[in-house]
Image (cartoon, rainbow, N blue to C red):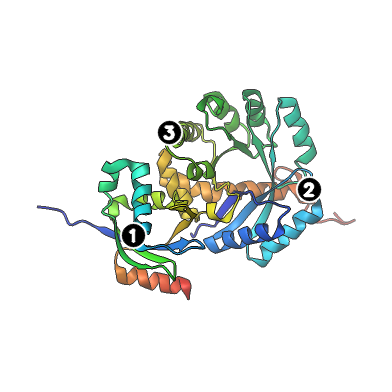
């Protein structure tokens, strides 16, 4: 029987003076993951964008639990989106969307 | 128990007070409790005190650090004699094998840093680790080169770090992971620095120690030594007076 895939939700702070389209942001994330782990590694991450707010510089992404550290390492190596300098910080990690928003709310409060 | 995170290598431009303060505030915001700022060896006490005060205003413990770029072992010994009592953290930047060996066996050196990308110019090998394990020196890994490089350069650098981290763990040489950031955009959260340790196969508990316990232990040990009550390791003045 197929095992249920465990997932993790990462709340991200996109630290930059500029704002970015969601497409540009995700392209940069995929590019960072591919550079570090190759296409085979990137295929294991199950990465997808759940929510993105460019004005608040906030993003929520979903990843496979087994690849959570891989994605976090790749996000830490991001220094640019296009030619604009950027830093991406993971501000909360959780197993459900509800919990991650609760954690982010507590941190921002 | 909750870990208290430290970053022992922030490199702001000390002459730019505004940038230094903003990096200190950023470190506090990212969750650090202790940071070490690299000062030029000729900077005065007043300047260091001013930055320490800015740190305490931001809720951050700021330690003073000096990087010694000595070219020969004799020069390193001379620099250590001159600067050891002025700074809380002393790092020997090893550009040659002779300097690396001298730094590893000298108990006044806290951190061994190898700035070169070229694996032939990185001297943290078995002999170096053995010397370091008998002294107080820790092996420092800066993350800035990992962020600013890419392609073949980063691949070779990761490969060198993997070998060196394994040697350090084998010889029980403490590893210190630092950001080495020269601006705010190169600063990362402590957990991110620890997770980046997985890129060179550093085990998670070792990586967490490398951003919390190991750097904090260095600063604690040196502050104790620099305090006026210190006599010798394990001996300190507890009370002064005629009746003692």
Q: Residue furthest bottom?
A: A109
Q: Residue at x 50, y 44 (%)?
A: B148
Q: Which chain carries label 3?
A: B
Relative image position of residue A67 (x, y in whole percent) = 30, 50
**Helix, strand or loop at disc 2?**
loop
- In this figure, which residue is indicated by the disc labeled 3? B152
Closer to the camera in the image, A93 or B171: A93
Q: In this view, does B220 lie to the left or right of B188?
A: right
Q: Which chain carries label 1?
A: A
Relative image position of residue B216 (x, y in whole percent) = 60, 51
Same chain assignment for discs 2 and 3:
yes
- In this figure, which residue is indicated by the disc labeled 1? A23
Rendered position, B66 above or below B21: above
**Helix, strand or loop at disc 1?**
helix
Q: Residue furthest left?
A: A1
Same chain assignment for discs 1 and 2:
no
Relative image position of residue A97 (x, y in whole percent) = 30, 69
The 10 Å Cα crowd at callout 2, few under 14, some 14 to 19, many 20 or more, is few
Rendered position, A26 above or below B178: below
Q: Which mark is residue A57?
A: none
Same chain assignment for discs 3 and 1:
no
Closer to the camera in the image, B34 or B224: B34
Q: Is residue B104 left or right of residue B144?
A: right
Q: Residue furthest front?
A: A83
The 10 Å Cα crowd at callout 3, few under 14, some 14 to 19, many 20 or more, is few
The 10 Å Cα crowd at callout 1, few under 14, some 14 to 19, many 20 or more, is few
The residues tagged by marks 2 and 3 sit, at their Cα atoms, a distance apart of 38 Å
Q: Residue at x 41, y 62 (%)?
A: A20
């Amino acid at each position: 029987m197929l095992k249920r895939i465990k997932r993790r939700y990462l709340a991200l702070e996109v630290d930059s003076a500029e704002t970015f389209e969601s497409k540009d942001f995700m392209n940069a994330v995929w590019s960072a993951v591919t550079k570090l782990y190759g296409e085979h590694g990137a295929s294991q991450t199950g990465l997808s964008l759940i929510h993105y707010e460019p004005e608040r510089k906030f993003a929520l992404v979903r990843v496979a639990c087994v690849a959570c550290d891989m994605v976090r390492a790749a996000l830490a190596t991001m220094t640019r989106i296009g030619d604009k300098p950027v830093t991406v910080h993971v501000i909360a990690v959780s197993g459900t969307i509800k919990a991650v928003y609760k954690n982010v709310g507590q941190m921002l409060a | 128990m909750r870990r208290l995170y430290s970053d022992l290598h922030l490199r702001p431009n000390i002459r730019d007070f505004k940038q230094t303060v903003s990096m200190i505030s950023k470190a506090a915001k990212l969750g650090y409790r202790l940071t070490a700022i690299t000062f030029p060896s000729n900077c005065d006490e007043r300047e260091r005190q001013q930055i320490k005060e800015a740190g305490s205003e931001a809720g951050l413990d700021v330690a003073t650090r000096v990087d010694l770029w000595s070219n020969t072992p004799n020069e390193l010994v001379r620099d250590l004699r001159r600067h050891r009592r002025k700074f809380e953290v002393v790092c020997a930047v090893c550009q040659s094998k002779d300097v690396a060996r001298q730094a590893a066996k000298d108990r006044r050196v806290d951190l061994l840093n190898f700035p070169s990308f070229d694996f032939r110019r990185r001297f943290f090998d078995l002999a170096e680790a053995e010397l370091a394990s008998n002294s107080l020196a820790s092996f420092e890994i800066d993350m800035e080169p990992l962020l600013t490089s890419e392609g073949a350069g980063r691949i070779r650098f990761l490969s060198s770090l993997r070998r060196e981290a394994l040697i350090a763990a084998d010889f029980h040489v403490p590893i210190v992971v630092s950001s080495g950031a020269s601006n705010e955009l190169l600063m990362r959260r402590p957990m991110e620095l620890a997770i980046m340790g997985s890129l060179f196969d550093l085990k998670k508990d070792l990586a967490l120690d490398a951003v919390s316990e190991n750097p904090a232990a260095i600063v604690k040990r040196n502050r104790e030594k620099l305090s006026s009550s210190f006599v010798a390791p394990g001996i300190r003045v507890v009370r002064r007076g005629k009746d003692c």
